[in-house]
Image (cartoon, coloured by chain):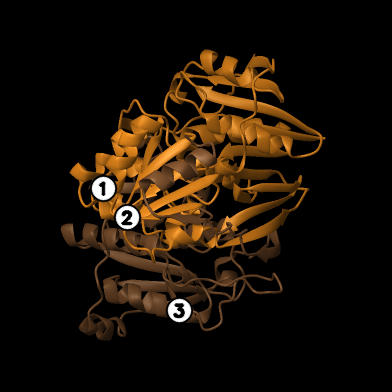
Chain colours: A brown, B orange
Amino acid sequence: MQKIMVCIKRVVDYNVRIRVKPDGSGVALDGVKMSINPFDEIALEEALRIKERGANIEVLAVSIGVADTQQQLRTSLAMGADRAILVQTDAAVEPLTAANVFLALAKRENPDLILLGKQAIDDDANQTGQMLAAIWDRPQATYASKVEIAPGKATVTREVDAGLETIEVDLPAVITVDLRLNEPRYVKLPDIMKAKKKPLDVTSLDALGVSAGILLKSIKTEPPAQRQKGVMVKDVPELIDALKKKGLI
Amino acid sequence: MHKILIVGEHDGKALNPATAKCVTCAKGIAEAEISVVLLGADTSAVAAQAAALAGVKSVLRVDRPENLHALAAVFAPQLAALAADYSHVFGPSTSFGKDLMPRLAALLVVPQVSDLMAVESAYRFRRPIYAGNAIVTVEADPARKLIATVRVASFQAAPSGGSAAVESKTLNVPLPSHTRYVGAKSGSTDRPDLQTAARVVSGGRALGSAENFKLLFSLADKLGAAVGASRAAVDAGYAPNEMQVGQTGKIISPEMYIAIGISGAIQHLTGIKDARTIVAINKDGEAPIFEVADIGLVADLFQAVPELAAAL
């Protein structure tokens, strides 16, 4: 194994309570804290742990997005990635477009492994890794909770509805990661300073020959229906009465 | 007319109830002709179950030894070959469908609508984003095939009473050998399946240990309920991952959901907001779970849960 590519998405921070714009045009993003998609952070952490177990593995962090996405790539470099590439665009990027961008980068960089989060916490699409594996014509192992690398192959434990499933894939492969794979490290100040000197290249969709066509038009965005406020009961006998009244027991 | 192909989920013996929910979703499209495809080593038993779903016109069986385990890399090229005859291909938004459908969409060079929760027309749908904190209406190009995963908590299962024609298909599609099934470990349980149970008892971090978590089992057994858990409880090792309810776990819609010692993070509420009745028991009266609960009780769970179980 020589190179691992990790795909990073810039998203609204996990802790932000988002607000839908009153005109239905989308979610308000002005002045909102942005971070690395938490699942992608876990993917990066896994790449770094594989690197730390082996020798001479390069970890490449790549992202697609606005110029400020450099912040998330700098954080990735501070965590320990060796190099970063930003495919800069102001356009909305659908999963299939993202997969095409990552394919173009994979063809250029020839990674042995591509790691990314199982979904991004903004659009919750859960598509990009699978789409990338399809058009790269390589194996996919989604929802990984354990990854073991051996020469030429990876054994991956996957979180599935029924429990855990283990599959074996030949490398190169795409692995999308789930929550319990690892706990990402905290970035230390000296690492932030060091990261400033690491290479971060900026390229464009045009340079990679990918167009950002919109295949799914967003018509409107609304807040979800709210549940009615319920009643409070003071003890278990009252709770049982309330359940009986609703015909639940 | 819209020809809709539903990718059936099964374990070789039983059709997963998610399939019947996809059928209901597809019926929401006007003038839909619905087929169900089953890939497996031997789909005879599950094909009969799919054929009995009301509204299904035909059931396609694709039996070959390589289809014994549901590997997306193996299933997707076969489905891509079949999809030529259809305008829409739907799969359930379960770990099976979420793994498989995007691979199929990319092979067909078409977009996917994930977690379809409502049908507005054949090419206009509603889906949740930001952990369900916003709902977006999306429209796809009718000139392209449409792939979607169906949010099963948003649809009732189609009833039985149908009698679809069953047809065996032979597909001469080369299959990759780069992905191999090794094994599976599932928490065997006599309790109802969490995804489809009418009643769910769920526990959070306040349970404090795996040992204490067992307190919920006696209550669940009294109610005939499935047992779920918050992410915090799973992360702490009190419950296995397949019990997790929420944005990244299972999205469920039971008749009754009893949240015990669960504070109610947004990501958890996403998984339960379609429950008919939410009951919350928590020591902290300020916990956000009480904002969505239909019935709330501020109490020490270690007293309230045994008392409730004993009274049932």
Frontmost of labels 2 and 3 is 2
- Three-letter amino acid code at the position of disc 3: Lys
Q: Which mark, residue A33?
A: 3
Residue B283, percent across and down?
A: 31, 59
- Three-letter amino acid code at the position of disc 2: Ala
Provide the chain ID for the residue under circle 3: A
Q: Are marks 1 and 2 in contact (CB under 8 Å)?
A: yes
Residue B86, percent across and down?
A: 72, 34
Q: Does mark 3 fall on the same chain as mark 1? A: no
The residue carrying mark 1 is B303
Frontmost of labels 1 and 3 is 1
Front residue of this view, candidates B153 and B274: B274
For numbered disc 3, what is the local secondary structure? loop
Residue B237, percent across and down?
A: 23, 48
Choose top left, top right, bottom left or bottom right for residue A39: bottom left
Provide the chain ID for the residue under circle 1: B
For numbered disc 2, what is the local secondary structure? loop
Q: Residue at x 42, y 42 (%)?
A: A240
Is residue B194 placed above or below B16 in the rendered structure?
below
The reply to whether residue A219 is in sight is yes
Front residue of this view, candidates B47 and B131: B131
Q: Residue at x 48, y 41 (%)?
A: A243
The residue carrying mark 2 is B299
- Three-letter amino acid code at the position of disc 1: Gln
Front residue of this view, candidates A108 and B270: B270
Q: Which image quarter is the N terminus of chain B in?
A: top right
- Distance in Å between CA atoms under marks 2 and 3: 36 Å
The reply to whether residue B254 is in sight is no
Provide the chain ID for the residue under circle 2: B
Bin the neighbour count of mark 2 within 10 Å (Cα to Cα): few under 14, some 14-19, many 20 and up: many
- Distance in Å between CA atoms under marks 1 and 3: 41 Å
